[in-house]
Structures are given as structure tokens and as C-alpha cells.
């Protein structure tokens, strides 16, 4: 397998000022991710995991450093180009799903494709909803779904455009163990089958252990970055 | 919960609400203050022209302490009471049914609203009632709306209060108190605004209409005209803020986490055009919220159109049925004074003058094309031509007779005047009428100086003048005084100016009122749209995070505002038409109007204007949402 670098983070810092106090939520973050990797980011609550993920996906601003996704420095793009870049290359899953309440499941999943003015790939869509076990929920509204179903819809929405990279912020943080297992299996399935690059934030060490690589953050700094024993070292 | 804190937290909404209330109350208070000033002026006028008394009583009266002043003239008592409100009772008391006659000063009494007789002033009162009632309705609806929206969007706050242990009654108290505080600030501001507006208006009136006012208008405040609007506004505010609260018991804290209208299942087909699709979905599920917006648009489109229609009908009446003379000055002298000197004096001042005199003429029947009288009044004028005005044109060329336009005389060569056998030859027929003679029934014969002098020995009748000479009034006044002339003159230029000023003033007042209505509406629109946009903050950011471009968000907002304003406008159009029809039928018999006035421009402008206002306030609210980063909007549940 050729190791294409899909994400590169250089010297990334993010600070919050509260009056006189300057607080670094992220400080000098450096790492890179290759295509097909399933990376877990762990750390205590408040350590900066979400902040990092939001910056990587272009939802939040940074103070210093660069984020390069597929050879594109995303902070060199203007707001509009970043939006277009995001819909072509990035998928995002949140802890609280963030589905669009006025659209049904099918519309929610298809939205990124419609926004990108692509033709809907029926085969891919059918396959996706089958895997996500949503075939008989397509007409439901998000508010009528269980948490697990909502999160599976969100995964469908994130994956429908086959993004170069998928970011997930505690995707199972709000779910029971049965649903957690189901979601984790889905992510692993896409990682294996389609070489989908995934970066997942979690505070569940058991989940992190199932990933290829585990980056640990503490007080905004990377304190550990290790590959699973079976994989070769960096 | 501290109210000051509450208001501070919702700074923008509070400021906009205060602005709305202050503009609305200034609208009502301005009418009140204006009419109190006008009333004061009328009282002065009545006292001067009719007399400063309450009642005239003839016969024996029994004096008592209720009487302030008695003046006896020609055996009648002119009585002024201490308390004008008890004028009927007190008169009964002093008369003891022994008075021979009682005549009340109805003009004065009606200005205090106590006259028992019909009076011209009652018409004036009716106009005020009409204005006040229609504005009150507009203001009520708009204020009610804006409070309703503000409370509906605060369901979340209300649920939070309840979560933290407030009873329904506590919540009720907090919200009413807050509304009353905002209302009070708004009303005081509105009072100040209306004072400023009225001072300006009265100054303008005094300076441009000084000719028709004896004395000057001055700012006067007649308390009932101020207190009633204040009470009315307070009632509106209490009602508007308490009525939407009737559902407060139904609010369960859980609604915090689940908004009802989110579960709306749209049956809109997926359109290729995503902004259009989104705008239709958003409109459909926001229907309840947009109701208020649609009512606002409806009211303002309606009032703007009706005001401008009323204005147009009024102007048309003036235009068609008030004859606007085409001369500047008309002078008439009785006795055999020779106007030669006067015309000589004026000639040096770039003045166009002609003289005229009247004769009875004898025109042989042969000269007529159709049958007509043989004897006609003949107006002989001097404007250096030898022509006679073809008579049919004198009936004026209004539409009715346009198609009849034809010569009534054959080529005229001679006219006999009375029995004196004066024959004027070489007369031409013409359609031109000398200025000042439009609408004259007479046949006009226009002669050169020599012939005119031969017929009219004295210029002892009329003189029409067109002049640019500004001091002509003074000149004539002095002339009359110096030569002790029995001369009257009428300065039509000045009356025209006054007429134009009145028209201008009415226009300014009506469009000013429209502007105020638009402003009140705007505050409501801003409140409604900003709360509706703010409510959807998370959705916008979520959409953007999965790839909706900003321009698409804006075009979806544009389409949404278009749907809403089209709807409000669409409801208004039939009402405008019906009211137009009502105005038309009520005046067409009086003024003989042929066609209804349909002002398409205003109709279209009002649609575009309301759409633009709604869209801009949506776009601005959306722009204001923009936190430093998308994630701040997404995180904020
Ligand atoms: N908008 C913000 N303003 C100020 N501080 C923030 C903001 N967002 C996050 N933080 C702080 O940054 C730190 C990292 O937060 P976050 O990335 O959400 O942690 P977590 O690892 O639990 O996901 C926390 O201490 C948090 O308080
Ligand atoms: Mg987090």
C-alpha cells in the first residue's frame, strides 16, 4: 500500500483570551495522517480534543500553524472556498448528531450530494442505508428517531460523498453500549472496506485500543502518539 | 429575577421594542397634540369672532356663584360660567324656566365636546375620531404582534424560569413588569418625539399659511388628548404581553430540548434548486411565526396604499373642481374712475394687463351655425387683436364636449352693439381665450387699443393682471388709500400659493404618517426576523458545515422573504381594491368621477419595499449571527 499523506498539522496553536488571561487550548500540535488510517484522539475532558477536531475540519479558527488536507492548506481558502472544500473532502460526525430537523432521514443523508450538485449514486446510497440499517426509516424525521438511529443517519450524511477524511467527535459519547458497538463496527467496516481515513475523538480507552493509532492530548499538547502493536512503527 | 438585568441581557430586542413603542405612541400623541393646539386656536377664534360667552339669556335671571361673568347688551345677558362643563345645568338653575330665550354658544361648547347641537365642528371631530381610531388599530396590531413574537421566542426563558422554581404567576409578573417598563420608556420617548414633531409642524404651518390664520397657532396640550393615548398604549402593552402568556401553563420545561415546529414533516418535493427548496420548507414550518410578519406587511401595505389613494382622490377633486384662475390679480372699480393711470403705472413692471367692458350685442341669426339667441352679453376686451372667441370653447374643453368641438359662428364680419349701431368689421374667429376668462358665458370680442377706446369710454369695470411685480399688493393698497377708491381686488396668485401649500402640507403629513407606520412596522419586522433567524442559528451553521455556500443561504433567505411579503401583500390587495371602490362610490355622485384611481406604482413599490425590508433585516440578522467560527453556533444548543 502506498502511504499517501492525507493530513498534515504543523505547529498548530489555539488560544482563548479571557480579559487579561491568555489560555492555550492547543499548543504546538504537530502530526500527520496517512490515507486509510483510523486514528483515535484521547485525553481527559477539557484537554482540547474537540477544539483540535474543529480546527482540523475548518469549523473553527486557529491562531498559529497550518492544517494541510490533501495538499491544500485549508486556512488559505476563503470562507466560501472552504465551504466547498469541506463538502467535497471532509465528513464530520458530532456527539449530538446535528441533523437538520426539518429534513427527513433520506434528505439529511443526501444533502451533501445535492449541495455539491452531484448526481445521486443510487447504488451507493442503497448500499449505505443497508449497512447503516436505516432502510425502513428513510421517511422519518430526526426528532422521531433514537439516538443510535440519529447517529447512523449522521454517519450516512458524513460518508455519502466519500470524503477524503472523516472526523468524528465522540460519536458514541451519547449512546448505550449496544449502540456504541454498532457504530464502532460501522466505522471499522468503512475503514477496512473503502480505506476511509478516520480521525475519532473519544475518551473511551477501549474504543481507542481498537484503532490503528492513538494520539493522547493533555492540556493542549500531544503527550503520546503510538501505533497499535501489530502495525509497524512510524 | 432582576428586570434591569433581564433587559440588559436582551439589549437589542429591548431597544427595538422601545423604539417601536415610542414611534407608535408618537404617532397617536402627535395627532393628539396637534389637535389640542388647533383646538386652542379655534377657541381663540370663536371667542374673537362670535363672542367670549357661554350662553345668551333673555329675561329675568337668578344670579348665583356659578357665574363668572355677565355682560348685558341690548337687554340680553351674555353669561360665562366658572365651569363650562356644567353650562346646561347651571343655565337651568339661573333661569328657573322663566327665561324668554336661551341661546348657547354652540361653536365654543362643541370645542369642549359638550354642545348638544350639530355643528360644523362635529365634522372636524369625526375626522379626528376616524384618524385616531384607524391609527389605534394599526398601532394595536403592530405592538400586539411584536410582544407576541417576543414572548413566543422566549419560551426557552420561560421554561428556564420554571426549571429554576418560578411559579406561573412569578413568570407572569416578570414579563408584565418588563413589558411595562419598556412601554413606559417608549411612551416617554414617544411624547418627546411628538413634541418635537408638533413644534416643527406648527412652525411650518405658521410660516407658510400665515395668510389664512388670524393670529398664530401655538403648541398647546389639552390633557385628555394626551392621557387617553397614554392609557390606550398602556392597555395595549399589558394586553399584548399578557395575552400570549395564557399558554404559559402548557409550557413544560422539556420544550427546552425539543422545539415543536422542528418536527414538522414537510411534504415539499425535493427541488433541484436547494435554496428554493429550503426556503419553502422553512416557510412552511415557520408559518406560525410568520403569521405576525405577514400581518405587519398586510397592515403597512394597506395603510400606505389607502393613504396615497385618499390623497390622490383629494388632489383630483381639487384639480378638477376647484377652478384655478390663470390670472394673478383681478381688479374691479366701481364708479367712473379711469384705470388708465393704474395700467400705465403697472406697465413698467413687466405686467400683462387687459381691460374689458360689457355690452349687450345683437348678432344676426344668419351668423350662427346652429340656432341660438340673438341677443348675447358681449365682453369687450383689449388685448390688441381683432378677434372673437368661438363660443363653444367657452364651455371649456372638458371631456364631455370634446367631440362636439366645432365652430358655432360662421365667419363673423359684424356685430351690432345694442341700438347704437356700432359695427366692428374685420373680426377673425379664434379659439384662444384671453387669460382670466375661462368659463365665461359671454362672447368675448378682443379689440385693439383704438377700437376698444372707441367703444368702452371708461375702463370702469374689470382689469385682469398677470405680473411678476412682487409689491403689487402694497401698491394697490396704497393706491386705494391715497385716492380713496372704491376698488376691490383679488390676488389669485396668493390664493393659489396657499392652496399649493395646503396640498403640500397634506402630502407631507400623509407621507410622514406612512413613514412612521413603516418605521413601527420595521421595528416589528426586525424583532420577528431576528428572533426567527436566531432560532435557526444552529441549522445555518450545520448546513454550512456540510457545504451550503453563503450565497445559497442568502438566496434562500431572499426567497423566504419573498414568499412572506408576497403573502402579506396579496392579502392586502383585495382590501385595497374594496376600500378604493368604497371611496369611489361614496364620492363619485358628488364629484362626478368617471374612473376609479388605481395607483399601480404605489402597489408595486409597497411590495418591493416590504420585500426588501424583510430581506435586509433577515440578512442583517444572519450576518450578526456570525460568530468567529461556525462551531460556536453549532455548539450553542
Ligand atoms: N469558546 C471558548 N472560549 C473559551 N474557552 C474555550 C472555548 N471552547 C473551549 N474552550 C476551552 O478549551 C479547552 C478545551 O476544550 P475542548 O476542546 O472542548 O475539550 P475536550 O477535550 O473535552 O473536547 C477547555 O478548557 C475549554 O474550557
Ligand atoms: Mg469534547
Image (tube, coloured by chain):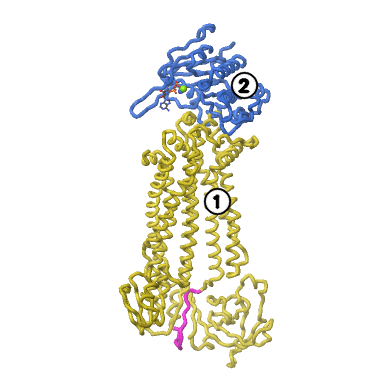
**In the image, B250: left or right of A111?**
left
Q: Do the residues labelled 1 and 2 touch (CB within 8 Å)?
A: no
> Dot 2, how many residues are within 10 Å of its Cα: few (below 14), some (14-19), or many (20+)?
some
Kindly give the residue lying farthest to the left in the view shown: B65
Q: Where is residue B62 in the image (x, y as percent from the top left)?
A: 33, 79
Q: Quadrant of the N terminus of chain B?
A: top left
The answer for which chain carries disc 1 is: B
- Quadrant position of ligand 1: top left
> Dot 1, how many residues are within 10 Å of its Cα: few (below 14), some (14-19), or many (20+)?
many
Q: Which mark is residue B127?
A: none
Q: Position of residue A157 (x, y in %)?
A: 59, 26
**Could you tell me how far apart the alpha carbons at marks 1 and 2 are, in whole angstroms?**
48 Å
The letter of the yellow chain is B
The letter of the blue chain is A
Which element is circle 2 on?
helix
Q: Is residue B26 above or below residue B466?
A: above
Front residue of this view, candidates A51 and B387: A51
Label 2: which residue?
A132
**In the image, B575: left or right of B74?**
right
Label 1: which residue?
B298
The answer for which chain carries disc 2 is: A
Q: Where is residue B215 in the image (x, y as percent from the top left)?
A: 37, 70
Which element is circle 1 on?
helix
Kindly give the residue lying farthest to the front in the view shown: B96
Give, as a single range, the part of the protein colored magenta. Answer: B327-340
Amino acid at each position: 500500500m502506498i502511504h499517501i499523506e492525507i493530513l498534515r498539522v504543523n505547529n498548530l496553536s489555539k488560544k482563548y483570551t479571557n480579559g487579561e488571561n491568555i489560555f492555550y487550548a492547543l499548543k504546538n500540535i504537530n502530526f500527520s495522517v496517512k490515507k486509510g488510517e483510523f486514528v483515535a484522539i484521547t485525553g481527559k475532558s477539557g484537554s482540547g480534543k474537540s477544539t483540535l477536531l474543529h480546527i482540523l475540519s475548518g469549523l473553527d479558527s486557529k491562531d498559529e500553524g497550518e492544517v494541510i488536507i490533501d495538499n491544500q492548506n485549508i486556512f488559505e481558502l476563503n470562507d466560501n472556498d472552504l465551504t466547498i472544500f469541506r463538502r467535497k473532502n471532509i465528513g464530520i460526525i458530532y456527539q449530538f448528531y446535528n441533523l437538520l430537523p426539518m429534513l427527513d432521514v433520506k434528505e439529511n443523508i443526501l444533502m451533501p450530494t445535492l449541495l455539491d450538485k452531484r448526481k445521486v449514486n443510487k447504488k451507493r446510497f442503497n448500499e449505505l442505508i443497508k449497512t447503516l440499517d436505516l432502510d425502513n426509516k428513510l421517511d422519518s424525521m430526526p426528532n422521531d428517531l433514537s439516538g443510535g438511529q440519529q447517529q447512523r443517519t449522521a454517519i450516512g450524511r458524513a460518508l455519502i460523498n466519500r470524503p477524503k477524511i472523516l472526523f468524528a467527535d465522540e460519536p458514541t459519547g451519547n449512546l448505550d453500549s449496544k449502540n456504541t458497538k454498532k457504530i464502532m463496527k460501522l466505522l471499522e467496516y468503512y475503514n477496512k472496506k473503502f480505506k476511509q481515513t478516520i480521525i475519532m475523538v473519544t475518551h473511551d480507552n477501549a474504543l481507542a485500543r481498537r484503532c490503528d493509532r492513538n494520539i493522547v492530548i493533555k492540556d493542549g499538547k500531544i503527550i503520546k502518539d503510538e501505533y497499535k502493536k501489530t502495525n509497524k512503527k512510524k | 429575577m432582576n428586570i434591569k438585568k433581564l433587559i440588559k441581557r436582551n439589549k437589542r430586542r429591548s431597544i427595538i421594542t422601545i423604539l417601536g413603542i415610542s414611534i407608535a405612541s408618537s404617532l397617536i400623541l402627535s395627532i393628539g397634540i396637534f389637535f389640542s393646539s388647533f383646538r386652542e386656536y379655534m377657541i381663540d377664534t370663536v371667542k374673537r369672532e362670535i363672542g367670549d360667552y357661554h350662553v345668551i339669556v333673555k329675561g329675568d335671571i337668578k344670579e348665583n356663584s356659578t357665574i363668572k361673568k355677565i355682560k348685558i347688551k341690548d337687554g340680553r345677558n351674555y353669561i360665562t360660567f366658572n365651569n363650562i362643563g356644567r353650562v346646561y345645568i347651571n343655565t337651568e338653575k339661573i333661569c328657573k324656566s322663566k327665561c324668554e330665550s336661551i341661546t348657547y354658544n354652540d361653536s365654543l361648547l362643541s370645542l369642549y365636546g359638550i354642545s348638544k347641537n350639530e355643528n360644523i365642528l362635529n365634522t372636524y371631530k369625526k375626522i379626528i375620531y376616524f384618524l385616531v381610531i384607524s391609527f389605534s388599530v394599526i398601532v394595536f396590531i403592530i405592538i400586539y404582534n411584536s410582544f407576541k413574537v417576543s414572548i413566543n421566542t422566549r419560551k426557552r426563558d420561560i421554561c428556564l424560569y420554571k426549571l429554576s422554581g418560578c411559579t406561573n404567576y412569578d413568570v407572569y409578573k416578570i414579563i408584565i413588569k418588563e413589558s411595562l417598563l419598556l412601554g413606559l420608556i417608549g411612551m416617554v420617548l414617544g411624547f418627546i418625539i411628538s413634541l418635537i414633531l408638533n413644534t416643527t409642524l406648527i412652525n411650518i404651518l405658521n410660516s407658510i399659511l400665515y395668510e389664512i390664520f388670524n393670529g398664530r397657532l401655538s403648541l398647546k396640550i389639552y390633557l385628555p388628548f394626551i392621557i387617553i393615548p397614554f392609557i390606550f398604549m398602556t392597555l395595549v402593552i399589558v394586553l399584548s404581553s399578557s395575552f400570549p402568556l395564557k399558554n404559559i401553563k402548557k409550557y413544560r420545561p422539556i420544550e427546552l430540548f425539543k422545539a415543536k415546529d422542528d418536527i414538522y414533516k414537510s411534504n415539499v418535493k425535493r427541488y433541484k434548486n436547494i435554496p428554493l427548496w429550503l426556503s419553502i420548507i422553512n416557510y412552511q414550518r415557520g408559518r406560525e411565526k410568520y403569521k405576525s410578519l405577514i400581518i405587519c406587511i398586510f397592515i403597512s401595505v394597506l395603510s400606505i396604499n389607502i393613504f396615497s389613494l385618499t390623497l390622490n382622490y383629494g388632489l383630483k377633486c381639487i384639480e378638477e373642481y376647484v377652478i384655478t384662475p390663470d390670472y394673478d390679480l383681478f381688479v374691479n372699480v366701481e364708479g367712473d374712475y379711469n384705470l388708465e393711470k393704474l395700467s400705465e403705472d403697472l406697465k413698467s413692471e413687466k405686467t400683462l394687463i387687459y381691460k374689458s367692458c360689457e355690452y349687450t350685442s345683437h348678432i344676426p341669426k344668419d351668423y350662427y351655425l346652429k340656432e341660438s339667441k340673438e341677443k348675447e352679453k358681449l365682453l369687450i376686451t383689449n388685448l390688441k387683436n381683432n378677434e372673437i372667441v368661438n363660443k363653444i370653447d367657452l364651455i371649456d374643453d372638458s371631456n364631455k364636449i370634446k367631440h362636439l368641438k366645432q365652430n358655432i359662428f360662421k365667419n363673423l364680419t359684424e356685430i351690432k352693439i345694442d341700438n347704437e349701431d356700432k359695427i366692428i368689421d374685420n373680426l377673425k374667429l379664434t379659439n384662444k381665450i384671453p387669460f382670466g376668462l375661462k368659463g365665461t358665458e359671454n362672447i368675448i370680442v378682443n379689440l385693439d387699443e383704438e377700437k376698444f377706446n372707441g367703444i368702452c369710454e371708461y375702463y370702469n369695470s374689470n382689469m385682469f393682471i398677470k405680473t411678476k411685480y412682487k409689491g403689487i399688493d402694497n401698491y394697490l393698497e396704497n393706491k386705494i388709500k391715497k385716492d380713496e377708491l372704491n376698488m376691490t381686488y383679488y390676488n389669485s396668485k396668493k390664493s393659489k400659493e396657499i392652496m399649493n401649500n395646503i396640498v403640500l402640507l397634506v402630502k407631507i403629513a400623509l407621507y410622514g404618517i406612512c413613514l412612521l407606520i413603516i418605521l413601527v412596522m420595521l421595528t416589528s419586522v426586525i424583532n420577528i426576523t431576528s428572533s426567527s433567524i436566531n432560532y435557526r442559528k444552529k441549522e445555518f451553521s450545520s448546513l454550512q458545515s456540510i457545504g451550503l455556500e453563503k450565497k445559497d443561504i442568502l438566496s434562500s433567505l431572499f426567497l423566504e422573504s419573498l414568499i412572506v411579503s408576497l403573502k402579506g401583500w396579496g392579502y392586502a390587495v383585495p382590501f385595497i381594491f374594496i376600500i378604493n371602490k368604497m371611496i369611489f362610490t361614496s364620492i363619485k355622485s358628488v364629484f362626478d368621477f368617471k374612473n376609479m384611481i388605481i395607483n399601480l406604482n404605489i402597489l408595486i413599490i409597497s411590495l418591493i419595499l416590504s420585500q426588501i425590508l424583510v430581506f435586509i433585516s433577515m440578512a442583517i440578522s444572519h450576518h450578526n449571527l456570525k460568530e468567529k467560527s461556525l462551531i460556536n453556533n453549532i455548539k450553542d444548543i
